[in-house]
Image (spheres, rainbow, N blue to C red):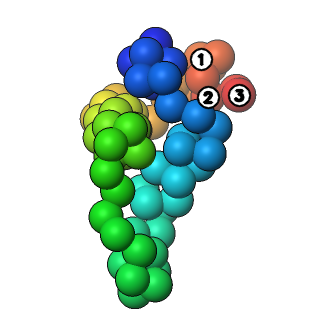
Amino acid sequence: MPRIIGTGATVEELAEARAWLANDEPMINDLRPLAQGRVRELVDILSELEEDGDEEGPADPGSASAIS
């Protein structure tokens, strides 16, 4: 989270980055330019965090992260 805050990005930029991660093909089909600047930086950070989360595997059923 500190890396995201450190970018100085706005809520709108974060929302756009999340949209790129979730729906890159429809956004390209709408002829939107590829993410640049802070949005691109956020896309990179969020995708790294997503990859790290995938590598951890399923949470232990008794852990706090499995409950939330």
**On the image, which quarter does residue 20 sit in?**
bottom left
Q: Is residue 44 above or below residue 25?
A: above
Q: Is residue 18 above or below residue 63?
A: below
Relative depth, front residue between 43 and 63: 43
For badge 3, the amino acid type reads: Ser
Which numbered disc, 2 or 3, marks the residue closer to the eye? 3
Image coordinates for residue 7, horizontal then vertical, percent: 42, 23
Relative depth, front residue between 24 and 61: 24
In the picture, the quarter occupied by the C terminus is top right
For badge 2, the amino acid type reads: Ala
Q: CA distance from mark 1 to mark 3?
A: 9 Å
**Residue annotated with mark 2:** 66
Q: Secondary structure at mark 2?
A: helix
Q: Secondary structure at mark 1?
A: loop
**Residue annotated with mark 1:** 63
How dense is the environment of label 2, judged by Cα within 10 Å: few (below 14), some, or many (20 and up)? few
Q: Residue at x 39, y 83 (%)?
A: 31
**On the image, which quarter does residue 52 sit in?**
top left
For badge 1, the amino acid type reads: Ser
Circle on res. 68 = 3
Image coordinates for residue 6, horizontal then vertical, percent: 43, 16
Relative depth, front residue between 64 and 12: 12
Q: Residue at x 51, y 31 (%)?
A: 9
Image coordinates for residue 67, horizontal then vertical, percent: 70, 27
Q: Are marks 2 and 3 in contact (CB under 8 Å)?
A: yes
Which numbered disc, 1 or 3, marks the residue closer to the eye? 3
Is residue 10 found left or right of 2 in the rendered image? right
Is residue 38 found left or right of 51 in the rendered image? right
Query: Of label 1 and label 3, which has the lower sequence position?
Result: 1
Q: Residue furthest bottom?
A: 29
Q: Is residue 33 above or below residue 48?
A: below
